[in-house]
Image (tube, rainbow, N blue to C red):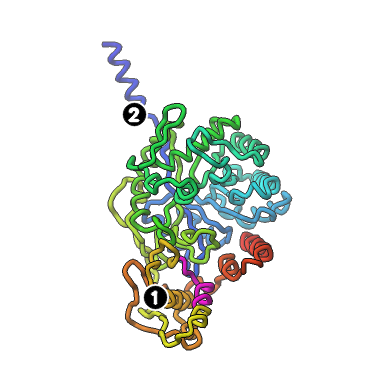
Amino acid sequence: MALKMMLLVYLLILLCRNDVVDAIIGINWGRTSAQRIVPSQVVDLLLQNGISAARIYTSQPDIIRAFHGSGIDLTVSSFNTLGFNTVDAAKVWVQEKFVPFADTIRNIYVGSFVFLENKDAVFDSMMNIHNALQDFGLSKIKVNMPQSHLMLKPNLTRPSDGEFVDEIKDVFDRLFRYLEENNTPLVMEIIPLKFIIEYNYDLSFGFADNKSTNVITDINGFVYTNVIEFLYDSFVWALKKAGHPNLKLVIGQVGWPTDGYPGANTSMAERFYKTLLPFVMSNKGTPMRPGAPIDTYIHCLQDENRMMFRDPYSRHWGIYRGNGEPKFKIDLSGQGRDIFPTRTKGIMRMPDRWCVFNGLNKNRPKVMKQFEKACNQSDCTSLYTGGSCSHLDFVGNVSYAFNMHFQFNFQDEDTCDFEGMGRVVTTNPSNGSCLFRVDVVRGEQNQYLPTAAVLLNKCKLHEVPKCAILLFLLSTFLALL
């Protein structure tokens, strides 16, 4: 009887424990787009969807101010790795950008897996920001540097192969000791589709539903059927080999694109999140770390059609289109319900007007010149192989490009001329899966700055070194905003 009573008391203690921390689902919000949802609308949208954490890629005070007092924990990313080469420079930045909003900011991320080029400079910048925060009494704000699977040695065949590349081991050791001393996790960024392409896995390996045709058994007998657990435990193994086996991991970026590549579509994205988010909220952990909560940030809120890209799907990570309409069903609470997220409120759509190719000019080189002009100044990644518009014929391709240019310029009729080849129509030219967009009315876009993507589209192959310098200078400038 006494033994039964002791067991009952023990079970009650376990049930009443409050020291078990559940994983959180956050969301990343990038603004490299011709159509920007205003910050106040974004905050309202996140609150309606029950999102308690967000990551932004700018330190603009007006954007941080929109989150202030909302209850949403904010992570701010800065790519300006050279702007904080002294503690004094970091202090100026911290005082201006973060001191007024200290209760809202939880993390500052510096760079984005750039160790291979500027490893010492990036680490020094991070430490300068950390020391500046300490001087202002803001030790609760953690400074970090996100890392991707590119920091692991290539040719991963199983998680136990995980090991950090030799070039960064010395700096990583300093980084890991700093993270442990400050009770800060290592942030890993996962691009499932990219990893699957690189390693020639079946697309089913991207989903945590145990339906993958790829089943990987590791040396310890652990079985992997999805890329999330595979890469997470690859990092766990790499940390173990680096002498830091207990360092916590969070996923600072993960998502599935919806266009621009075979397998990048809304149905696949819906399947990805419907399996991933319940896995996160289950606190199941992975084979190497069973029961460990994995904080996970979805990438991302909306498409970024001005994003610099090597892969065309990079502009199509968004859960929402630029007009605030959700693309697919996703339960952001992680319960796996078959629901659409809340639609963005307060966004006005432009009239139903499209710009198309009139077909009168039969001189293909001249038409192609206008087609290239339209694409260089807008976004034609949906026309790439496997994209939603890759089935269009020549006329359809040109019309799609003309319309994207027209919508990017807020339906200014002068931007539908194309040397007499374009015309404005009121009949929707959408074709099957290919959506001819009508964008939102001009808002914050009045202040839109040229982005690296626009400049990259203008770079010719022989100009890559010159363009790379220009892009670096531009990104450094934008990071200071």
What's the residue at 56%, 39% (across, down)?
184
Residue 470 visible? The answer is yes
Q: Residues within 10 Å of mark 2 (few under 14, many from 20)?
A: few
Q: How many marks?
A: 2
Secondary structure state at the residue bearing disc 1 = helix
Q: Residue furthest left?
A: 1
Q: Quadrant of residue 300?
A: bottom left
Reading the image, the residue beneath label 2 is: 15
The span shown in magenta is: 371-381
Q: Which mark is residue 307?
A: none
Q: Is residue 56 above or below residue 462?
A: above
Does label 2 or label 1 sit earlier along the sequence? 2
Q: Along the line of sight, which residue is nearer the eye, 31 or 104?
A: 31
Residue matched to label 1: 396
Which of the pair 140/278 is nearer the observer? 278
Nearest to the observer: residue 50 or residue 441: 441
Circle 2 or circle 1, nearest the eye: 1
